[in-house]
Each structure stands twice: as C-alpha cells, then as structure tokens.
Amino acid sequence: MDRRSLMWMTFMVLVVVTAVYLVIMEDQLAVRQTPQAHTSQDTGAGGNAGAAWGDTAKEAGGNLGAELGDPAALAGNNAGSVWGDMGEAAKSNAGAVWGEAKPAKLCILKTDTVFIYTPACGSDVVQSILFRFGYRRDLFVALPGKPGNPSILQDPRSGDILREYLLKPSAMAARADWDINILAHKVRYNRDALHKVVNGNAKYITILRNPLDRFETDFVASHLEKQFDVEQREHPPALRRYLAAPEFWEKRRMRVNSRCTTNCMAEALGIPVRGRGGNALPEPDGNGVMHYISKLESDFALVLIYEQLNKSLVLLKRRMCWGFRDILYDVSLLEPPATQRNARGESEKLQFRRLNGADHLLYYHFYDIFKAKVAAEGDDFHREVRHFERVLDKVSLYCSSALDDVSVANQTVVWGSEWDEEFVVTRQMCWSLRRKREDWDKLFRERYTHGSQSQRNN
C-alpha cells in the first residue's frame, strides 16, 4: 500500500472519529436540556464510560498503525490519541452532566396566606404579589365590605373580623361557613380572630424595615407633620425638626387622628403599644416585648426584610413552592429611599430609638432570624437570587418598552432554569404588575359580583 493510500485511510479514520465524537456531544447536550435526578455514582459511571471509550479508541488507533506499517504508525497512533482525548472529553462532560443534576425535592404548592401589612415597609409590593397570585389561580381573596377601604374592620375590643365586614361572593351566598384563601388588606394581627375567617392551613407572613428608614418614608409620604400641633415652617423641614426632638412632638400630637407615629410595626403585629383612643402606652420593657415577639416567631412562617427584598421573595418562593412569575413585582411599588438616618447625631438616634423601642427589638430580632434562614439555604440560594434578579431586570425592561410602544412584541419568553420552568410574559401581565390595591379591589369585586373568569396571563 503506497503512502497516499495510507494517508487517505488515516484521514478517513479521523473523519469517523469526529463523527462519533459529535454524536456523543449531541447526546450530552440533550441530557443538559432535561436534567434528571442523579447521584455522585452517575458521575463515576459517566467518567468510567468515557475512559473506557478513550482507552479502546487509543488501542484501536495504535493497532491500525501497526497493521499499516511503520510509515503509518505515527498517523495511527495520533488517530488513537485523538480518539482517546475525545473519550477523555466525553468522560469529563458525561461526569459533569450527571454530577450537576440534583435530586428532585418534594415541593407542595401552598396557596393560603395571611399577610400582615406594615406601613412604609414595602408592603405594597408583597400585597400586589399576593393579589396577582390569588386572581390568576381563582382563589378567594378577602375584601372589605366597603369599596375602596384599604383596611378590614375589626371589633375594637376582641379584634374579631365579623363576616358582615367582608364582601361575600355571590357564589357563596347560600353557604353559612366559607374560608378565605388570601388576606392581604390592612388588619391588626390577632391569631385567634384571623383563624376564625381564614383557612386553617394558611401561612402567616409579614415584612419589616429599619425603624428610622420606615418612619422617614411614612412621615414624608403620609404628611405626618399634620398630626402635630406645631407651627409649619419650610426651614428646617418638618422631618428634621421632628427627629431633633421627637418626644417634644409626640407630647403635642393631636388626638383627632389615631394614625400611628411610633412603634408602628409592633402595633400592626399586635404588640400592645397603644391603648383606647390611640393614646400611646408607656414603652413596654424589653422582656414584655420579647414575650410577644417569641409568640410571633412561632406563628409566622416567614418575616421578610425590606432591605433584603429579593432574597426575601426567593425565600418566600421556596417556602410556598411558587415560581419566579409568582414573585415578580413592579419597581414603582418600592418605597422612596430614606436619607436622614446617617444625617442625625447619636443623641437624636437614641431619642428616636427610646420612643420606638418595640420596633427596634422586633426588627433586629427577625433580621437575625432571616440571616440564619438564608445561611441555611446554602450557596445555591444565592445563585438563585442572582438569577431571579436577572429575570426581574428582563421583565422590567420588556414591560417598560411594551407598555409605552405598541410596536414591541406582544410577549417575551423567560427561559427555564434549574430553579424554575419557562414562562411567557405578555403585555397583559405587565399591566397586572403595575396594578395597585384599589385596581385589584375593582377586579375582584367584579369577579365576585358577576362571576367573570380568571385572566390566566396575569
């Protein structure tokens, strides 16, 4: 056999090797598209298969070179080496594919939720998420009997929510007893009272925020300066004047309006910080507050932290067995940034803390618990949070364009990942992300009154 024939045969061997390798890699890519539950034993199995293929290939290449004679030996050995290297690559890829796949975790969808609304803590974000979730899944979401009311009325003594305080869907008109799936309007926490109207399997959640940041946002957004009998002046602004002497302002607070101005998170969560008529009680001692906080710790499935909102929502997703589309939110619902915390002196911060001791104990207790829960989730949790933030950015970018420009495509796809399945974002869904409480109230009332069908794309 002449040299040209030998070279041609070697070339054909390499062609065959390449074709086999491509088939192997195509199979591996197919596996990556549909990961399954495998163990570390699969990694070894994949690696052993690749090694065996490589060794066999190398040996076959060497034998071929020997049969063809010395001039072709080098080419044959090279072919075997190439084939062997490909086998090693197959070993690595197969092992990585099987090794990366994780055992499937048992996850049971949870739909029944009570959210305790805390003012200026990002509650509008969580409230909107729950309304959208309930609407899309045809759940019974509690509504106040009076349209437009942000709160659900409670008996001032017992804290009970009477059935006549709630809107009753026409479909339930003949039923004496009916359970609520989701309650997210403002209501003061009282576990016994809520248990009478909400599904017994409901998970209780709330959200907390740094007390000084929370107060600043509420002061500005709600014009809390109107609560105090103090002369209005532009310079210095009312907020700075309040933080300079909070006790002075509180002593002059007008009683015609019972709006909370101190320990507002603690009050929303049922910690006794105000008496009848809205008058502030003497600041409870630390042991008294911690007694209530320990009860809340056992009652609440999760306490979200506003400063760690995205981590909080991913943790909520995991606890409730939800998807990314269930925890999406519109950034316009976020609270305005606080700017005064670092501008105050230590004495002023101490004065504020003395007036809001219950809120400080509450916030830092649950912040520590939240950090411990995040740490227990492991490194995979942080990768999921980063992926969720990318999804959130993609959806926000699409919605900002789609709602302002009719020429933009009617939908975009969020590809599946190891943490969630693929889903489609439509213009309709973008509108639902922007809805506020009053908008959701109208939609739910229309459904409960006329029995309209759920809009599945919301």
Image (cartoon, rainbow, N blue to C red):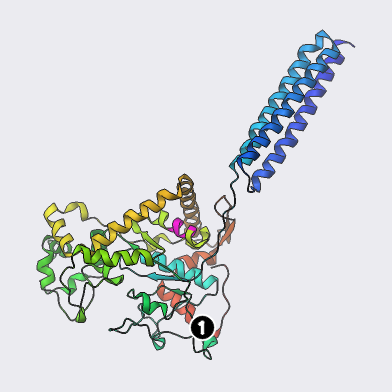
Report the span colored magenta: 313-318
Q: Where is residue 39 in the image (x, y as percent from the top left)?
A: 61, 43
Query: Image height check: is 146 above or below 315?
Result: below
Quickly name the residue at label 1: 448
**Number of numbered discs:** 1
Query: Image height check: is 392 above or below 379?
Result: below
Image position of 258 (left or right of 26): left
Q: Position of residue 12 (x, y in %)?
A: 82, 23
Can see residue 232? no
Q: Position of residue 231 (x, y in %)?
A: 10, 71
Task: Identify the residue at image location x=85%, y=13%.
Answer: 68
Image position of 179 (left or right of 45): left
Which residue of the protein is positioned furthest toward the right in this rendering? 1
Q: Is the magenta stretch mostly helix, strand or loop?
A: helix
Query: Image height check: is 4 above or below 359?
Result: above
Task: Identify the residue at image location x=16%, y=79%.
Answer: 255
**Residue 128 occupies which quadrant of the picture?**
bottom left
Task: Identify the residue at image location x=55%, y=86%.
Answer: 171
Image position of 75 (left or right of 325): right
Q: Which quadrant, please, contains the N terminus?
A: top right
- Mark 1, Cα crowd under 10 Å, few <14 / some 14-19 / many 20+, is some
Q: Nearer the viewer, residue 436 or 75?
A: 75
Residue 315 forms part of the magenta stretch: yes
Query: In what element is the residue under mark 1?
Result: helix
Tag 1: amino acid: Tyr
Residue 279 forms part of the magenta stretch: no
